[in-house]
Image: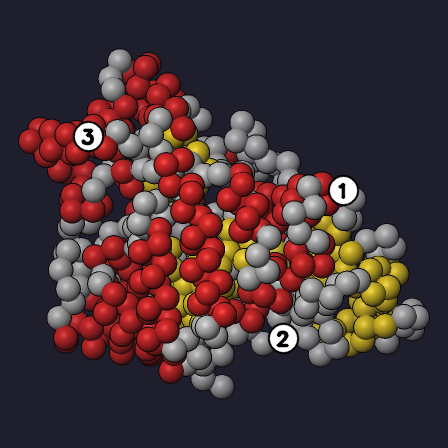
């Protein structure tokens, strides 16, 4: 009767409701039945006794857009129960100008990725054709639109340029993009004004899209940045998502309560805004982020060239020394170097900026500039800058979902060339294990909803994020008693534990905790896509 029968589990439907003892029958790519005592005839039977059965998890902010082409298994997240990955934080895999395509090929060379697409919709279809273990979907990156049309100049878009960006956005929305996403701390996206972003969001609203944002400031400007976000969402009339809500820097931790209040007041006023977090107190970004925006004008290569000019270095050195900050932290020992590009710099991977500075005999500011200039890359780093209390406060809010903000990978091959933030392997399992089971910050049914039903509603993904008859059969079976993250900063390349089965579009993709070889993922379209 069924292709797959999941028998005897505790079923959570993704709505936040408590578990119901039931079987789940799957036929084709859909859930055919949910109930007790379903007929046992099935091509495959999963014994879920003592386990939770729930909708597949949706990673609303993933950075796996390139790694999924290198390794379509996506084991780091698949083995946590993530069945859908969402891309596009400020930059997206299209639309690509010739310059953007060349830059993308350069930064992805260590993964042997060939950039054969131009449009975002073409990229999504390309991934689907090649095969992927998970579903994929994407926002249009506002920074990518700006870089392709305006370039890397710190100036307002002209009316003609804005019209061109709006036209491209409309085409991509019609082809399945989820909405517009910005990352307003990174040039050239940071060069966009509120009016430009609002205008792009009006286009997304025409297609029932969403606006998601890494807001313009997560430190002392957090409240002002959230105010800008809320004005854009309110003015354009669309759903809004705050990417990785946080207050960075010890001196700014007290701002988190006010940030939560701002968003809760907006929700009380009827504004459809939500947020997400990754369950760690360290962020991860490029070390280049510490360099003020104006020195990035012209693009990454221009920044690296400027660092070779003594007078420019002196100006940057003076600014950074005066602020006494590296990103949003005040201690160089709280900046951990993760991934570099140049072979000569690999010896610094896994060491703090303070340790590198001491070994080189230079100050932290000089060391950071030297590393960036010699590596000619953004240099991925972790910044230990957030409060555990603030993270828990966010996790207690029913409108806050979960993301990884990282690339999914596997503990093998090219991925082992550098350490990574453990969120790449553990974000979802960490919520289910540490924060739900062990510390009871949130109940299990609601934790599941935050990873399934909540992001599906925010993104407008029909038939996903729920476990009920007729829904797509993206399903996770896990043991609430053993689910746990294993990855740490000192030993990050470790898969999580406790997830035994994962179905993606009805295909058993993980069985007994091991990948089966099925690449059943699909490119998902937003609600405004052409039918």
Residue 172 against residue 67 in the figure, above or below: below
Viewer-proximal residue among 369 and 102: 369
Mark 3, other Cα within 10 Å: few <14 / some 14–19 / many ≥20:
few
Rendered-image quadrant of the N terminus: bottom right
User: Circle 2 is placed at which residue position?
Assistant: 463
Instruction: Locate residue 469, reporting x and y percent.
Output: 75, 77
Which numbered tag is attached to residue 482? 1
Would residue 472 be found to the left or right of residue 273 on screen? right
Nearer the observer, disc 1 or disc 3? 3
Question: Can the viewer see residue 124?
Answer: no
Q: Is 399 left or right of 94, judged from the image as shown?
A: right
Q: Tag 2: Cα neighbours inside 10 Å, few (<14), some, or many (≥20)?
A: some
Q: Which of the two labelled residues, at mark 1 and mark 3, occupies the earlier sequence position?
A: 3
Residue 374's spot in the image, x, y percent? 24, 30
Instruction: Tell me the distance, in whole angstroms, between the alpha carbons under discs 3 and 2.
Output: 53 Å
Q: Is residue 443 above or below residue 409?
A: below
Q: Could you tell which of marks 1 and 2 lies nearer the N-terminus?
A: 2
Instruction: Name the residue beneath numbered marker 3.
Output: 322
Left or right, residue 76 beside residue 49: left
Mark 3 / mark 2, whichever is N-terminal: 3
Which is more foreground, mark 3 or mark 2?
Answer: 3
Q: In percent of the image, x 66 and y 51: which residue is there?
A: 442
Q: CA distance from mark 1 to mark 3?
A: 48 Å
Residue drawn at the location 50% of the way across and 56% of the way down: 276
Is residue 301 found left or right of 279 in the rendered image?
Answer: left
Residue 147, percent from left and from top: 23, 60
Q: CA distance from mark 1 to mark 2?
A: 29 Å
Q: Is residue 482 visible?
A: yes
């Amino acid at each position: 009767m069924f292709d797959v029968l999941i028998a005897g589990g505790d079923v959570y439907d993704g709505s936040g409701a408590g578990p119901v003892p039931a079987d789940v029958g799957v036929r084709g790519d859909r859930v055919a039945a949910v109930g007790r005592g379903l007929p046992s005839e099935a091509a495959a039977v999963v014994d879920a006794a003592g386990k939770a059965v729930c909708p597949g998890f949706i990673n609303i902010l993933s950075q796996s857009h390139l790694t999924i082409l290198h390794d379509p298994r996506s084991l780091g997240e698949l083995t946590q129960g993530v069945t859908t990955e969402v891309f596009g934080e400020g930059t997206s895999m299209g639309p690509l100008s010739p310059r953007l395509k060349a830059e993308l090929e350069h930064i992805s060379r260590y993964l042997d990725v060939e950039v054969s697409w131009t449009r975002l919709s073409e990229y999504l279809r390309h991934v689907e054709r090649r095969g992927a273990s998970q579903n994929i979907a994407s926002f249009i990156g506002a920074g990518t639109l700006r870089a392709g049309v305006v370039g890397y100049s710190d100036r307002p878009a002209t009316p003609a340029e804005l019209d061109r960006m709006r036209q491209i956005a409309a085409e991509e929305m019609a082809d399945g993009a989820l909405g517009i996403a910005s990352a307003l701390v990174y040039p050239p996206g940071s060069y966009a004004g509120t009016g430009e972003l609002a205008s792009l969001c009006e286009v997304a609203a025409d297609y029932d899209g969403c606006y998601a944002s890494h807001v313009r400031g997560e430190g002392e400007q957090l409240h002002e940045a959230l105010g800008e976000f809320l004005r854009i969402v309110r003015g354009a009339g669309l759903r809004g998502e705050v990417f990785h809500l946080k207050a960075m820097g010890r001196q700014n931790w007290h701002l988190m309560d006010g940030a939560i209040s701002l968003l809760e007041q907006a929700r009380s006023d009827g504004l459809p805004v939500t947020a997400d977090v990754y369950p760690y107190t360290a962020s991860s970004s490029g070390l280049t982020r510490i360099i003020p925006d104006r020195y990035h004008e012209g693009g990454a290569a221009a920044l690296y060239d400027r660092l070779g000019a003594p007078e420019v270095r002196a100006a940057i050195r003076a600014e950074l020394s005066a602020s006494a900050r590296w990103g949003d932290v005040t201690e160089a020992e709280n900046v951990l170097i993760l991934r570099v590009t140049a072979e000569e710099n690999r010896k610094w991977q896994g060491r703090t900026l303070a340790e590198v500075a001491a070994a080189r005999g230079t100050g932290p500011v000089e060391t950071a500039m030297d590393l960036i200039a010699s590596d000619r890359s953004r240099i991925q780093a972790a910044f230990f800058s957030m409060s555990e209390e603030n993270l828990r406060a966010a996790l207690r809010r029913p409108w806050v979902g979960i993301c990884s903000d990282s690339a999914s990978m596997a503990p093998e091959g090219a991925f082992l060339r550098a350490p990574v933030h453990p969120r790449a392997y553990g974000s979802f399992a960490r919520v289910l294990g540490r924060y739900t089971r062990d510390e009871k910050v949130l109940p299990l049914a609601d934790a599941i909803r935050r990873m399934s039903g909540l992001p599906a509603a925010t993104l407008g993904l029909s038939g996903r994020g729920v476990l009920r008859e007729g829904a797509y059969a993206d399903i996770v079976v896990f043991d609430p008693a053993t689910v746990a993250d294993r990855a740490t900063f000192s030993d990050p390349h470790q898969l999580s534990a406790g997830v035994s089965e994962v179905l993606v579009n009805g295909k058993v993709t993980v069985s007994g905790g091991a990948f089966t070889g099925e690449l059943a993922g699909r490119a998902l379209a937003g609600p405004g896509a052409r039918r």
